[in-house]
Image (cartoon, rainbow, N blue to C red):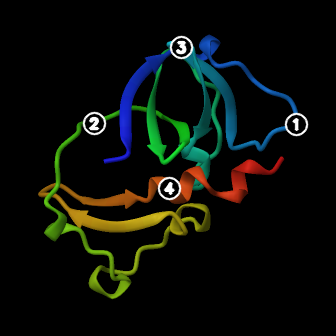
Amino acid sequence: TSVVEVVEILPEQITPMPNISSLLLGTFNLRGEIIWVLDLRQLYGQAMTDLVGPCAVIVIQEGEGVLGLAVQDIQGMAWVDADQIKSNPHEFPDESLEEGLAQHVQGKFYTEERLVILLASGSIINAKQWAAA
């Protein structure tokens, strides 16, 4: 419910900024609003790769905070019944999540194909790990 929109941008549309966290790719201009872009792959432990070609940026908002999450691709979107979301860690199998991601997990649910991790957008937006250089 925190997703404002999903946009496709080119790497050259992201302006790198000096002396910021390595998790941040920089900023981009979304219809006159400057949006910070966080590399979600790095947050969950994958090595940063150079962006080649368009990337998807999921723009999330929590209160006054707005942040873009750069992802490799989007495989689909769907509404999920809140009853399907398991937020108690004892309700789902113990997965090994990268520490950077584990602290932002709001819950998990299963689709027919796989386990899906639901991230807490407010936790990501307010995280100190990426806000510090």
Name the residue located 30 percent from the left edge and 48 percent from the top edge. Answer: 1
Q: Quadrant of residue 85?
A: bottom left
Could you tell me if the residues under marks 2 and 4 are in contact, i.e. CB atoms within 8 Å? no
Q: Is residue 31 above or below residue 77?
A: above
Instruction: Please give the residue where the numbered disc 2 appears in the rendered image.
Output: 75
Which mark is on residue 3?
Answer: none
Asked which secondary structure carries label 2, the reply is loop
Within-10-Å neighbours for mark 3: few <14, some 14–19, many 20+: few
The reply to whether the C-beta atoms of the residues labelled 1 and 3 are less than 8 Å apart is no
Q: Which residue in the protein does label 1 denote?
A: 19
The Cα atoms of the two marked residues, 4 and 3, are separated by 26 Å
Q: Earlier along the polypeptide chain: callout 2 or callout 3?
A: 3
Residue appearing at x 56%, y 65% in the figure: 98
Of labels 1 and 3, earlier in sequence is 3
Q: Which residue is mark 4?
A: 122
Question: Relative to residue 61, is residue 84 drawn left or right?
Answer: left
Residue 110 lies, in percent from the top left, at 20, 64
Cα–Cα span, label 1 and label 3: 22 Å
Q: Is residue 22 left or right of residue 70?
A: right
Secondary structure under tag 3 reads loop
- Decide which of tag 2 and tag 4 comes sooner along the chain: 2
Q: SS of the residue at dot 1?
A: loop
Q: Amino acid at mark 1?
A: Asn
Q: Is 80 in front, or is 63?
A: 63
Q: Nearer the viewer, residue 21 or 115?
A: 21
In screen coordinates, is 113 left or right of 30?
Answer: left
Q: CA distance from mark 2 to mark 3?
A: 19 Å
Q: Looking at the image, is 113 positioned above or below residue 98?
A: above
Check disc 3 and report the residue beneath it: 10
Mark in front: 1 vs 3? 1
Give the mark, 4 or 1, whose residue is nearer the N terminus.
1
